[in-house]
Image (cartoon, rainbow, N blue to C red):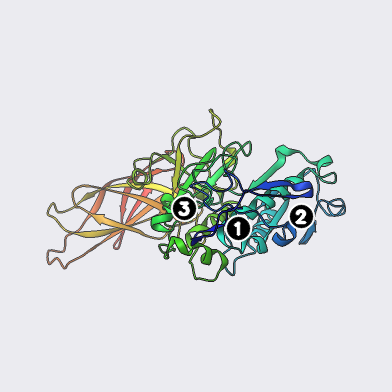
Amino acid sequence: PLRRSLSGVSPVSAAAEVCFDELGCFADLPPWGGTPQRPAAVLPWRPEEIGTRFLLFTPMNRYYQEIDTDQSVAISNYSGKRKTRFIIPGYLKNGDEDWPQEMCKVMLKWQNVNCIAVEWKKGVAAPYAQAANNARVVAARVAVLCSSDTFLPSFNPSDLFLFSGLDPIEPYFQDTDASVSLDTSDAAFVDVIHTDALPFNSKLGLGMTQSVGHIDFYPNGGELMPGCSANKGKPTDLDAFWEGTKKFDACNHVQAYKYYSESMIKSQGFLGFPCSDKDSFAAGKCFPCADNTCPLMGYNSDRFPMTDGISKTKYFLNTGSSTPFGRYSYKVMVTLEGPSWSNLGVMHVALAGAADSTQEHKGAITPGKTYEKMIDAEVDVGEVTEVKFRWNNHIINILKPKYGASKVELQRGKDKKMYECSPKKSPTQQLLVNK
């Protein structure tokens, strides 16, 4: 076959294919190789070289049971009465290879399911084009397992979920034929989380930019995640990054599965707002959610009703820089009272409710005008009972001006609910008590 790596080109030879018993045959012809998107025509390794393993977690076993197409399914704790989840990883960050197993453990704390972590550590730790083609054999192994005699009799396809749209990879998959990459024909419902969607050739973003699912989420704009730095390196170093021979910080890319894991526990913290682009979302133009048009990113995204079957809208949200990542969106509008002259300062706003209280969120103020700020609260306070605010000067003012609030309104992002607050002064801060 045609053999090219991302760092060079080797001699051209005739097209070829390999066949593996029940898995079928795999060719290196287009669309799988020799195209602008997939320049290297590479055949996948043999199944035993890839080393795919299926690690079953259920409520009945604390540790995984390894299953396969033989009788190991029949003697395992697998049950066709439960829904089945397959977690199929792609890029494996060094020291973080077992995240599918950890995700299964988290899932089982909240759901009575069969969770199968698909492991192919040997097959993915290869030159990039080779790993991309080895994934074809992994997919075939999953399909054969699901159709095996020991699996199929008690198996309902509508109860099957495959976790593979967690920042789907760009090189060798973006703008390819539908048979090659993830798209809406692959399942009844395909949801996608984009966390590293900067262009690969110029910014080394590993994830796809384009929308490929029934519904696509772009947390934090989808390109650079809080707590992560910009990707560094050269596109020609992808083989070395992938094999682990050259250091690469995959922080942005791996945040997708971390968000997904947390969404199992705190789903309401991952509300996605429909918006045309990330800049409009950042400017507050897509707030609040209206008429149940906001899905939950992650584990509960399939509960979102879509009238046309495929959402043509991108969904945006903000997260924190570390766990807990989930955020709860509000817009606060404060009309200040006090001296009319210009006095630069910073307003600090916190929310309190029956369930919890937030930390302070700050922003610049202009006396005599309405102060408006988007707040992504780190906790869910429930029904808001108080809005607390204070302000600080940037410079010393010998006139010691005093400012308060003549009007405060608060809007909750998830349902447009408005809170109108009346001032209640204290020596150090202003308490706006919900009417």
From mark 3 to mark 2, how far is it between C-alphas?
30 Å
Give the vertical position of 303 relative to 430 (above or below).
Answer: above
Query: Can you identify the residue that label 2 sits on?
Result: 59
Which residue shows up at 44% across the image and 45% down it? 316
Q: Tell how many labels.
A: 3
Give the vertical position of 223 relative to 293 (above or below).
Answer: below
Q: Nearer the viewer, residue 58 or 94?
A: 94
* Circles 1 and 3: CB atoms closer than 8 Å: no
On the question of residue 48 being in view, the answer is yes
Label 2 or label 1, whichever comes before in sequence order: 2
Q: Nearer the viewer, mark 1 or mark 3?
A: 1
* Circles 3 and 2: CB atoms closer than 8 Å: no
Query: Can you identify the residue that label 1 sits on?
Result: 130
Residue type, mark 1 in image: Gln
The label number, if any, that marks residue 201 in the structure image? none
Query: Can you identify the residue that label 3 sits on?
Result: 327
Q: Nearer the viewer, residue 119 or 59?
A: 119
Residue type, mark 2 in image: Pro
Residue type, mark 3 in image: Arg
